[in-house]
Image: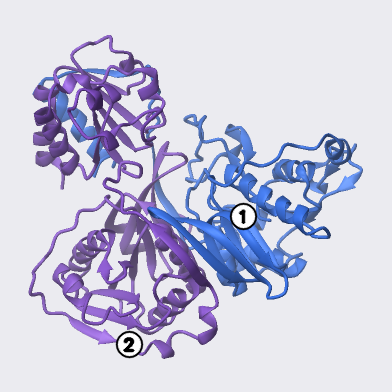
Amino acid sequence: MLAKQVPDTRNVGPDAMTPEGTVNRSALPAIFNPEDLNALEQALRLKDQFPGTTITVVTMGLPKASDVLRDALYRGADDAVLLTDRALGGADTLATSYALSMAIRKIGVPDLIIGGRQAIDGDTAQVGPQVAQKLGLDQVTYVESIEDICEKSRKLTVIRRIDGGIEKVETPMPCLLTITGSAPACRPQNAKRVMKYKKAAAPAENNPKATIEIKQWGAADIDAGLEQCGLAGSPTKVKAVQNIVFKAKESKQLSGSDADVEELIVELLNSHTIG
Amino acid sequence: MNNVFVYCEIDKTTVEEVSFELLTKGRKLANELGVQLEAVVAGTGIKGQVESQILPYGVDKLHVFDAEGLYPYTSKPHTSILVKLFEEEKPQICLMGATVIGRDLGPRVSSAHMSGLTADCTALEIGSYEDKRSGKVFDNLLYQIRPAFGGNIVATIVNPEHRPQMATVRSGVMKAEILDVDYKGDVVYEDVCQYVDETDFVVKVLERHVEKAKNNLKGAPIVVAGGYGVGSKEGFDLLRKLAKELHGEVGASRAAVDAGFCEHDLQIGQTGVTVRPKVYIACGISGAIQHVAGMKESGIIISINTDPNAPINQLADYVITGSVEEVVPKMIKYYKANSK
């Protein structure tokens, strides 16, 4: 299961971006990406249905991204891996998918890779398909529910949301699914599991009270080529960033005069708010 | 080589509107770069059906892939087609719709080619870029402009060194314009077997239920919504004009629907559609809680109201105190005068 810790984009301040145009994660509350929680629930349902299934959660990020790994363990995941390394930082979706695919290779390609459709900080929906391509796997995106698994033929039947409707799709395993926010919400944390895993931590968290070690891998551990990692491995570069945060209640008062209306239109055009 | 490519989506044998919008944009980019515009379409039974739909947008070369199993869309066969075609043709730019299909296909192609992809662009321009580390200057790059971070910022993304430069754009963001109904472009009927492996067809679409929405209110980047203060059906025609100019959609409050000013399926709010556009223009809407519930997550809210104390003004980024019939025509006028 692929998960991401994301800044809560509902509370964005002026210091949300660094001068280099990357996200200043320390300035924002960090949360479990919502659609990744929907994905975790689908994984847990499969585990309920097929005892013996194990769920490994993988995330890439700063050491504090271990928060989402612990949260997943509290809710029923079996194992967790943190990918963290300076060499992996500043990655765009392509470099991220490379690192994740290398980590999955190290674990061993499972029957099913499952993740949220997209993360709320980027809204790109790219990492899932990019991982599938790197691993040569089939994929079904925008999945709302897993209807059926045929153990004999090793095929999955899923319902996916498409523009204006739904599609029922059959796919062989192994494959990768991305789950939409319209899928069922994730079950809550389990109290016993919280007691057990609250002492789980990755080495980089430097928690002296930790008794369970969360696996922590860097670029070398997953045999990643450095030229394909992080900022160096990211073909997309941020040229410019414009902040368009408008605080409600600080509304700009305009009259209906020609001058005021024109000024507004020009302002919206210049900020690419309208095109 | 080095041309601009557009991947065209189809519904059976009908090319989707979003593809026409991208072809129109692609033509302009190709002109600016002095290269050709090429299009790719893949489906079943499309030969003889799609050519006359696509070429009039100024397409110099259309690649048609027609074979069983290419419709409905599944990921791998279409990925294989684009990956191999791009190896041969080496496009500098590739545009796709930011639709369920484009967002499924684009990342796979970019992943295979190790090229950059920017999702959900709201504007595409050509310009230069200086890499601050190396001091190297790149000319004629595609500026991929998109909102990010929950719509709180607008970022300009470039792919200096990797090709193709890939971008997806949502339906309704660009404007579709036929260049010449008799535009003479080449059509190539590709040998699908050369591109797609039999094993690519293992994913099967078992059932499909699609209803064409009468409007695109839900996904519209710009919504012009009218309330009781619009006053009449004719008043709504004015809003439609503004929405058309801005490539947006018209919505309404319950009060306007109940008064019979517009159709029921335009209703925004708790009991209607929930919208999260980039720009929400509230025309003569007071801002009842139930309406606000359906639009409060909009990016920028502009309120046009004769009552400076209308509750919606609390929420608005811009408050224009004035009547709808006075202000809306001015917005149309100044948009026309100032947009490129």
The image position of residue A9, as x and y in percent, is 51, 36
In the image shown, does A238 or B276 lie closer to the viewer?
B276
The chain that appears blue in the image is: A
Amino acid of disc 1: Gly
* Quarter of the view holding residue B229: top left
* x 56%, y 69%: residue: A170
Using the rendered image of the protein, determine whether residue A84 is visible from the camera's viewpoint. no
The image position of residue A160, as x and y in percent, is 51, 57
* Quarter of the view holding residue A216: bottom right
- Label 2 marks a residue whose chain is B
The chain that appears purple in the image is: B
In the image shown, does B311 or A273 lie closer to the viewer?
B311
For disc 2, the marked residue is B190
- Label 1 marks a residue whose chain is A
* Quarter of the view holding residue B92: bottom left
Crowd tier of the residue under label 2, counting other residues whose Cα lies within 10 Å: few below 14, some 14–19, many 20 or above: some
* x 29%, y 55%: residue: B124
Q: Are marks 1 and 2 on the same chain?
A: no
For disc 1, the marked residue is A115
